[in-house]
Image (tube, coloured by chain):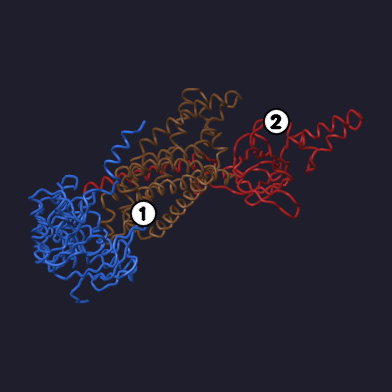
Chain colours: A blue, B brown, C red
Amino acid sequence: MNQSSAIVDIQNLDYSVSNRPVFVGLDIRIQRGLITAVMGPSGTGKTTLLRLITGQVMADSGSIEVAGENLRALSRANLYVLRRRMGMLFQNGALLTDLSVFENVAFPLREHTDLPERLIRQLVLTKLQAVGLRGAAELMPAELSGGMARRVALARAIVMDPELLIYDEPFVGLDPISLGVILRLIRRLNDTLGITSIVVSHDVKEISAVADQVFLLSGGKVVAHGTPPELKFDTSETVKQFVGGLADGPVQFHFPAPDYFGELLSRSEDP
Amino acid sequence: MLRELWDSLNDALEALGAVIQFLLRLIVNTPRALMRFDLISQQIFNSGALSLVIIMLSGLFVGMVLGVQGYELLQRFGSEEALGEAAAIGLVKELGPVVTALLFAGRAGTALASELGLMRATDQISAMEMMAVDPIQRVVVPRFLGGVIAMPLLAAIFSVIGIYGAQLVGVQFMGVDAGSFWSQMRASVALSDINEGIVKSLIFGVACSLIAVYQGYYATPTAEGVGRATTYTVVTSAVVILFLDYLITAAFL
Amino acid sequence: MGKSRTLNLGTGAFVLLGFAALFFLTTQTTSRGLPFMSPPHYDLTAKFDNIGDLKVGSPVSMSGVEIGRVSKIDFDEADFKAVVVLRINARYSQIPTDSDASIYTQGLLGGKFIGLTAGGADTYLKDKDQIDFTQSAFVLESLIGQVLANFTKSKAEAPAAEAAPAAAPADSKAAAKPKAAEKAK
């Protein structure tokens, strides 16, 4: 097993969607064992970055190495093997609606292993206990609140003991209590399981509390990276606007439009 | 205007190509999906058993209409005894496969499309891919096979109930001799007619299930997208069924 | 896992119902039963000049009672005759060897069937025997053609009318056959 300290190594990546460039010459190195946050304004392609890392989309040029494997060189079957070493938490949990909570968490085990039933049961209950939902094992996803659904999805993501955990906007729409719970879980899981976590989010305050490293994306490139304190005192306009939550700055408030008074007046002159 | 026609023709051909490619992908994944027979069994239940009520009711009414209309028509030539034969051939060769397929598209086809569309819209499909489970094998192929297997069975049930419906009207209500009803039927319905009906319903099953799972799997992941997928499923299935019906009938002649 | 049990039951019941329907259709609506369902039988062959639209599965009857079915239709290239295999129910094992087989029409426009008329011999037909005396199918068009031809001929030559019956299709025992057929009807 490759023991390089970067579990995800992206170099000079280019990626466009329908001729619109999303990333140009992107360079990101994500260290093992740390919680790394990926932040940026809406639309900078944070989710796209995750899909590039997991191999759901392919880059136009440049290289991505995950756990030492060059994604471009992998066959579909080997990509699936690599994915078993990763766990992903989707924004809305993405639980399978026709299965119970227990069955959802057991799903990867049933699909990929031949473990006997009682062993599966023990594993599932252990993971559910880790996220605090062992008692909800028999509920159906429709009966869960948003926060609970996300915790079940988290249990499912760790059931195969992955090396890399990816969180796609895990804080969206959560009440403060659930938010705190997820935050603590991210930190605790990362430390007790000895894994690497990548969190995509734009909740600056929240994620700064647990992240070890932060990458700030804007305009298809990394505009800042470092520890949360380093970012707070960064002097570039882009970083200041994002971290400070300022309405106007490098990311403009106004969507491009013709001259305001000109548009108002011309309308009132219509016959 | 000609340019628009050309463009839509191109789009249609492209869509056809995509659908055929999808079908090939499903066929390639079928052997492995067959190993999870419990999934397929569940889908046979969803597409077949749950459609039984509407199929049986429709079969009964269609049969009864055949009985009434057939009697009225044959009576003009003094050939009421041929009612059994007329009803049986009409049902087994045409009405059974076609009406069943249309009803299937409406009931089971839309269910398949909306299920898959919803799974796509709520990221369940992406989640499966991320968990290194091939969604085609686990979710799509079982639904496809469930539809293909259920369709000929449903068509056969439709035809049988239809024949009894025609008998109900013809023999019980209109007084056609029961013996002639069945014996003339037996004398003129050949195994090749039954075969034609089975082949038709199998082909319709493949077409309807394919269209439904394709529309659902590639639905735009929004509420409107799923709604569109279900509408397109019914409309496209109907047109394709009727078109294929003509081709197969002509081929068998 | 009670849910999956009811599910399996439901699926099984549905599939069974479907196959029952298919079985019903193939056996109860067609004239073909299942091979293992047919009673013991033996086969006889008969050669005809013209079988009309006699089909496999058409009935074989004697004195109006169905005693078997046509099981195979072949063509003999040596003498250009149709070879028909009649599958006779084993119950009827006393058909005289000099019986004849004719092809009749059901009703006026119905399908064809084979009628056997008993001869007077003491020996009976066994499995794989051939019926030597046959009468071909009644083809409406040729009869109409003949009648028209006869009308024009008889108008021209009255005495030639007596030769008309001799112009009927040439079969063995052709002269005796039409009369015997009329008697049987």
Q: Residue C142 carries which label?
A: none
Q: Is residue B73 above or below residue A71?
A: above
The residue that disc 2 covers is C185
- Percent position of residue B241, x then y: 47, 42
Name the residue at 38% across, 42% down.
Answer: C17
Please tell me whether mark 2 sits on a helix, a strand or a loop.
loop
Examine the rendered structure and indicate whether residue A80 appears above or below residue C103: below
Image quadrant of residue A190? bottom left
Residue type, mark 2 in image: Lys
Label 2: how many residues lie within 10 Å, few (<14), some (14-19) or many (20+)?
few
Type of amino acid under label 1? Val
Residue C117 percent coordinates (x, y): 69, 38
State whether residue B10 appears in this view.
yes
In this rendered view, identify the residue nearer to me: B117 or C148. Answer: B117
**Side of B80 where B137 appears, left or right:** left
Same-chain status of marks 1 and 2:
no
